Image (cartoon, rainbow, N blue to C red):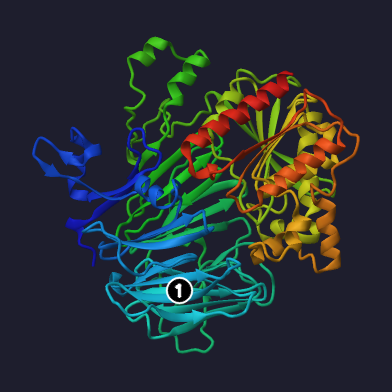
Amino acid sequence: MVDFPRRRLYYRRVEEGMQYPVLCRRLLSLNEEFISSKSPAGGFDFTSGKRIEQKLLDYNQEAERFGGYAYEELSEVSPDHRFLAYTMYDKDNDWFKLSVRNLNSGALCSKPQADRVSNLAWAKDGQALLYVVTDQYKRPCRIYCSMIGSTDDDALLLDEPNDNVFVNIRHTKDFHFVTVNVFSTTFSKVFLINAADPLSGMTLVWECEGLAHCVVEHHQGYLYLFTDAARDGQLVDHHYLLCSPIHSSSSPRKWESIFNDDQDLIVEDVDFCYTHLALIIREGLSFRLCSVPLPLPSGKKGFNLEELNPRFLPLPKYVSQISAGPNYDYKSSTMRFTVSSPVMPDAVVDYDLSNGKWNIIQQQNMLYERTRILYGTASSTSVANKSSNNVNFRSSSEVRSGNDNLWNDLTEFYACEHYDVSSHDGVSVPLTIIYSHKHKCANQNPGLLHGHGAYGELLEKRWRSELKSLLDRGWVIAYADVRGGGGQGKKWHHNGRRTKKLNTIQDYLSCAKFLIENEIVQDKKLAGWGYSAGGLLVASAINCCPYLFRAAVLKVPFLDPTNTLLYPVLPLTAADFEEFGYPGDIDEFHAIRELSPYENVQKDVLYPAVLITSSFNTRFGVWEAAKWVARVRERTIHDPNRPILLNLTTDIVEENRYLLCKESALETAFLIKMMES
C-alpha cells in the first residue's frame, strides 16, 4: 500500500544560468510551503528553517562525468523511493551507461554499473534491478538481475544468441511483475517474471506470428494486453485490448477482447490506475480522452464503450496528439496527460478519472497577450497591468459560459484547416495548414511543408514557438501526413515502406502541388522541412521536382540509404530494414536506389537553397550530409541566391537547450532570407 502522508513529488527544474536541470523531490504535504517559500530554488523555507526540497541528481555534475555532455535516456525510482537507476549517454563510446544512486546519501552504488544498457525495471520492492544489455551492434539481447547491496555477480536471466531477435523489459504499474518482450520480424512473445522472486524464471503468457507491439499490464488479478497482432490469421489495422485471468489454467492462455469491433472508434493508447482505465481514442482526425471505472463488469465478454459509462475530458479544437505522462502513482486516480495542438502551446493536464475534475498545471502563456497587441485586440496598457504569469486555470466543474479561453489556445489569431489531397494513385492524404488570420492572402504567402512518413510514427503537429516568427510574417505552415507515417493505421504505414516507399515521396509532392495550385502558397515560395528520415523524404522530393521548392531545411537527415544499409558494421536495427528494405533482396535493393537522395541528384538543374544541419554524434553518420552536399554542389547549377549550406556541430543539439535555440534561429533566418531574395 502507498504511504499517503509520505507521498512524494518528483520533478526537474533548471537553475539560473545552468545548461542542464536538477532532479528534485519533496513531500506532497509540504507543497504549499514550497510554493510560498522565499527561496524555493534553494530548497528551504527560511521563515521556519524547514527543509522542503531534496536535490537528488544534478545533471550539470553528470555532464562533468561524461565529457561536458549530459543526456539521460532512462530514469526509474525504486518502489521504496531509496534508489534511482538511470542511464547516461557516453558519447566517447557511443553507448548508455547504467548508474544507481542512493537517494538518502546521494552516493553512487558500487554495483550495478553496466555499459550498453537499453532497458531497466525494478523488482523485489527495490531490492533488485533488472536491466538489458546490447551487443556491439546495439541489439538488446541479454537480461541481468542485480541485487542492490550484494557483492555477488549480477545473475544472467536471458541470453538471446539469434542476431535477428531483440529483447526489452518493463515493470507492470503495480510492480507485481516484470514483462519480457522477445521479438523478431517473424514472431513476438511476452513472458512474465514474478517481481517478488526475480530469479524464479519466466512464464510465457503471449505469443504470435510476425512483429507486433505488445504491452502487458496487471490489474487486480487480471492481465491486460494492448497489441496490434494479427487476429485469427488476419492482419489488423489498429491496436485492441485483451484480458485474461492471471491464474489461467488453459494452455495456451485464453485471451478475450474487451471491446467490440468499431471501425469508427480507434483506441490509440491505454493507461491504468488502481480504480480506472484511461483511453486515448481517435474518431477520424479527432482525438478524445476518457476514463472507464475498474474492475470491468463481469459476465460479459465484449463491450461497446458507451456501456461502460465513460467520462470524457472536454478538449480544445484541433487536438493533434494526446500523450500519457509517467503516471507512476498507481494508487492515485489523478493521471497526467499532455494535450497538443497546432494552434495551442502544449498543455500538461492533471485529470481526476474518478470525478472528471481537471487542471492545466503547465502551459506556455507568454505569447498570449503579446499576440493580442500584435493583432490589435488588446492594448499595451492592459498588458502592463496584467502579469502573464498569473493565469488561473479552473477545473471543468467551474467552466462558465462566455469568452474565457480556458485552454489558452491561439485560434483568435491563427487558423487551422484540414484538407484531403489526392495523391498520384487516388489515395487521399491528410494535409493540415495553419496561418495568421491577419496575414492570409490568396497566392501571396510563403509556405513551409513538414513531412516525415517513416516507422509508422505520428507526424508532430504540436505548436512550436519558433514558428510564430514565420506565421506573423504571413507564412503558411503545412503538415503532410504521408504514407509510411502513423495516425492512419498499420496499413497506412505498410503502404509507405520497403518497395512501396515511393508512395511516401509522391504523397509529399502531391501536397506540395496542392498548396501551390490552390493558391494557398505562392508559386516559387514553398519550402520543405524534414528531420531524420523526414530529411530523406524532402531530399527525394527535391530530386523529383526541384522546381517546386524555393528552399529546404534538412535536420540530421538520412541521405544515403543505399550504402548505409549495405554496410553491416553500422549499428542498424530490424526496424531499419523493415522500413527501407533489405538490400540483399534484388527488388528491395532497386527500390532503395530509386528513392535514395544521394543516388538521384539531377545534373545541370537548378536546385532550391538547402540548409543541412547534422552532428558528429548522431545515428545517421555525418558523412551522409557531407557527401550529399558535395554531390549537389558538383552536379547542379550554381546560383549564389540558392546556396547549399552545411552546418555541423560536435554536440547533439536536441539535448542542448542553448544550441536548440541557436539552431532554430538559424533555420528561421535562412528561410526568411531565401524567400526575400
Q: Where residue 539 appears, x then y in whole percent? A: 76, 42
Which residue sits furthest left? 48
Task: Report x, y in % for residue 588.
Answer: 82, 63
Q: Nearer the viewer, residue 562 or 366?
A: 562
Counting labels gives: 1
Which residue is nearer to you in this view: 583 or 169? 583
* Residue position marked by numbered label 1 in the rendering: 179
Q: Is residue 111 above or below residue 93?
A: below
Q: Amino acid at mark 1?
A: Thr
Residue extending farthest right: 604
Which quarter of the rendered picture does the C terminus lie within? top right
In this picture, is 669 found above or below 159?
Answer: above
Quadrant the N terminus occupies: bottom left
> Is 473 left or right of 326, judged from the image as shown?
right
In the image, taking residue 138 as reference, residue 567 lies left or right, namely right
Q: Is residue 513 visible in this depiction of the protein?
A: yes
Q: Quadrant of residue 543?
A: top right
Mark 1: give few (<14), some (14-19) or many (20+) Cα within 10 Å: many
Q: Is residue 4 left or right of residue 417?
A: left
Is residue 299 at all visible to an observer of this figure?
no
Q: Secondary structure at mark 1?
A: strand
Q: Residue at x 83, y 62 (%)?
A: 589
In the rendered image, residue 128, in percent from the top left (x then y), is placed at 33, 73
Which is more toward the observer, 443 or 147? 147
Position of residue 443 relative to residue 506, above or below, is above
* Residue located at (66% from left, 74% from top): 210
Residue in the picture at 62% in, 31% down = 667
What x and y, as percent, mark residue 592?
Answer: 80, 57
